[in-house]
Amino acid sequence: MTPAQEKRLGQAFLRSIKSSETLLSEPFAKQYIEELGKTLVSASGNQQNKSFNFFILDNPAINAFAGPDGHIGVYTGLILTTQSESELAAVIAHEIAHVTQNHLMRAFHNANQLSLPSAAVLLAAVVLGAAAGGDAALATAIGGQAALIQQQINFTRTNEKEADRIGIQTLFDSSFEPHAMPVFFERMGRANRAYASELPEFLRTHPVTTNRIADSLSRAEQHPYKQHQSSLGYHLLKAALKEESFYKASQSEKYFATNLEEGRYRNKTAQQYGLYLSYMRQHKYKDAESILNQALSEQPLEAVLLISQAKLYQQTGRPKQAIELLEDSLLVLPGNYPLSLKLAELKLHSDLADDAIVLLNGQLQLRPDDDEIYRLVAQAYAKKDDKISAHAFQADYMYLNGQLEPAIQQLEIALQQKGIDFYQASKLEAKLKAYKQENEQVKADKKLSGK
């Protein structure tokens, strides 16, 4: 497979993932996992300069997976299960190694016998079926090819051993704790014995044996001990996911308040943030403001907390104050992605669409495949009554989320608008033609497979 073919397959694969799974769209969560991934890639010996894309799936499964063209997905369940940032980094470093060592290409070679759209759908179904530990995703795969690809995508013991070895070296070279990999494996091994037939998903796709734990421990001990302090971003993300895991906000309030009262935490700011979130869910705005101010007194330049303060101002009828806060924050943290998107959102609510578009276009240049930016830009042009641009950007948003036919409909609507100029029409017609060709190929493959 050529690099260009792999890139196209990767893009189609990601769209297929998005059409069947919910990805975390919270900007700070996206930024965190991307920055963690980039740190590890830079230390991974990525000699082929492979591209990578990291994202979080909103799913309690305890797992992670690697897809074509370096698309690496991490489940929220895995993040919550890790006890340190080094443990999370260990799993991601392992997946990175599968990509850099071309372990994936055997499966993709077989899938490449199909057309590009079908191969992407098939791979997405198989990877999700394996990573989520069930057969539901496999049921959506094409024809009888699923079982064949499933056999190919389950990495051999040699592949796993090599990914562990390279992953441990990557951890050390990126200043994470190399022992985090055998520590996490050992905890999963204990779960293996405890769960019996109901294994965590990680154990189904990454079998943890005594030999594997011993081997990874031996390799980790070849490196000098280094203590890695988990970042504030890691703790804040875990706190947000933990708060969401409670069905009732009153339960999460009790959890975080008790932790703070009894000093049972690894990061105080994260516990304060979790308590703030539980208060906001219950509309206890005075309590939320009080605990947030405590957190900000210790971390005045943390973007997550500044955005939280802006949300509090917004929900308590102080939109102007919220906008001023974020504008001042961007002077100190210029170009910050989460701050910029939240400010753009506030500008939209205040009928300042032109300001929002300027902010969003700046971010789009840095993140051309970020679906959340396209969604907000579409809203901004709708506010300006620019129907052509609004529908065009909405089409981009839908396409990136795997909604091919709705994307086609949005482009067709855009082309029907009065006042469209030749340049706009030509650009949109070319995109529409490409979308229709891809959609026809998907339909043809489904028909051939009897679906």
Image (cartoon, helix red, strand yellow):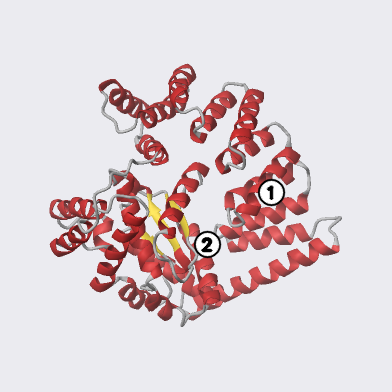
Cα gap from disc 2 to disc 1, whole angstroms:
22 Å
Instruction: Say which of marks 2 and 1 sits in front.
Output: 1
Nearer-the-camera pick, 421 or 137: 421
Q: Amino acid at mark 1?
A: Asn
Disc marking residue 361? 1
Q: Residue at x 61, y 21 (%)?
A: 317
Residue 281 lies in quadrant: top left
How far across and down, in percent of the image, does residue 267 sit?
Answer: 34, 32
How far across and down, in percent of the image, does residue 349 sit?
Answer: 67, 33
How crowded pointer 1 is (Cα within 10 Å; few <14, some 14-19, many 20+) is rated as some
Q: Residue at x 85, y 60 (%)?
A: 421
Above-or-below relation of 104 to 358: below
Residue 37 lies in quadrant: bottom left
Q: Residue at x 82, y 63 (%)?
A: 423
Above-or-below relation of 299 to 196: above
Q: Residue furthest front?
A: 224
Residue 200 lies in quadrant: bottom left
How crowded pointer 2 is (Cα within 10 Å; few <14, some 14-19, many 20+) is rated as many
Nearer-the-camera pick, 85 or 229: 229
How far across and down, in percent of the image, does residue 336 sit?
Answer: 58, 41
Disc marking residue 15? 2
Q: Amino acid at mark 2?
A: Arg
Nearer-the-camera pick, 312 or 134: 312
